[in-house]
Amino acid sequence: MRVLKWTLGAVLILLIAGLLIPEKLVIPVQGATSKDWNHNTFWYAPWGRSGVHKGIDIFGAKNTPVVAATSGIVIFSGELNQGGKVVAVLGAKWRVHYFAHLNDYHVSAGDVVNINSQIGLLGDTGNAAGKQPHVHYSILSLVPIPWLYTTQSQGWKKMFFLNPHKKLTAH
């Protein structure tokens, strides 16, 4: 019982510490501005097999450097059917920053990345094959944010997905 209490206490301290870390973000495509994505595509429906678009697509020239939008730990780099070549970074506030459709990636799971460090190259892999090169950028909160719930299609998932447009233009 004593070990359980210590374990729960340690987990609680770790959770709170992660939430207290300040979050700083940059646009994850080198040289891009807010004019390089459609501000209204977050939660746009209908959107292919996923139903709604849970991120934004930042466009640019193929092989433009894609940088870490925040400092954190790479928790996944590899290939997925829809996302193609992807990277996921766990950052402050227990948020996962997801970068999809990369032409290539330069990091591996377990790597620590700093904000603005190159993680890959802009591409058109996965279900973006043959489309204009872009990175699909999503922010997923591992800690639910209940007040973000809506009655929209899949609105309960909005407790977990943050609008990257709002986060990037607020900084």
Image (spheres, helix red, strand yellow):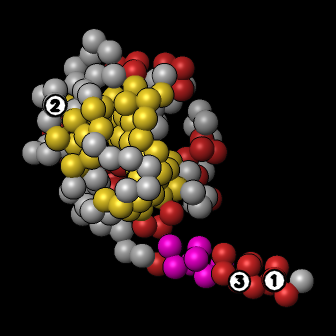
Q: Between 5 and 158, which is closer to the camera in this rendering?
A: 5
Q: Which quadrant of the view contains residue 55?
A: top left
Which residue: 46% across, 23% down?
Answer: 82
Q: Which residue is mark 2?
A: 63
In the image, residue 42 lies in the stretch drawn in magenta: no
First in residue order: circle 2 vs circle 1: 1
Instruction: Tell me: 34 left or right of 88.
Output: left
Question: Circle 2 sits in a helix, a strand or a loop, which is it?
Answer: loop
Q: Residue at x 29, y 54 (%)?
A: 69
- Residue 14 image point, x, y percent: 58, 77
Name the disc covering residue 3, or none.
1
Q: Amino acid at mark 1?
A: Val
Mark in front: 1 vs 3: 1
Mark 3 residue type = Gly
Dot 2, how many residues are within 10 Å of its Cα: few (below 14), some (14-19), or many (20+)? some
**Mark 3 nearby-residue class (10 Å; few <14, some 14–19, many ≥20):** few
**Looking at the picture, which amino acid does disc 2 mark?**
Asn
SS label for mark 1: helix
Within 10 Å of disc 1 (Cα), the crowding (few <14, some 14-19, many 20+) is: few
Residue stretch in magenta: 12-18
Which disc number belongs to residue 61? none
Residue lying furthest left in this view?
31
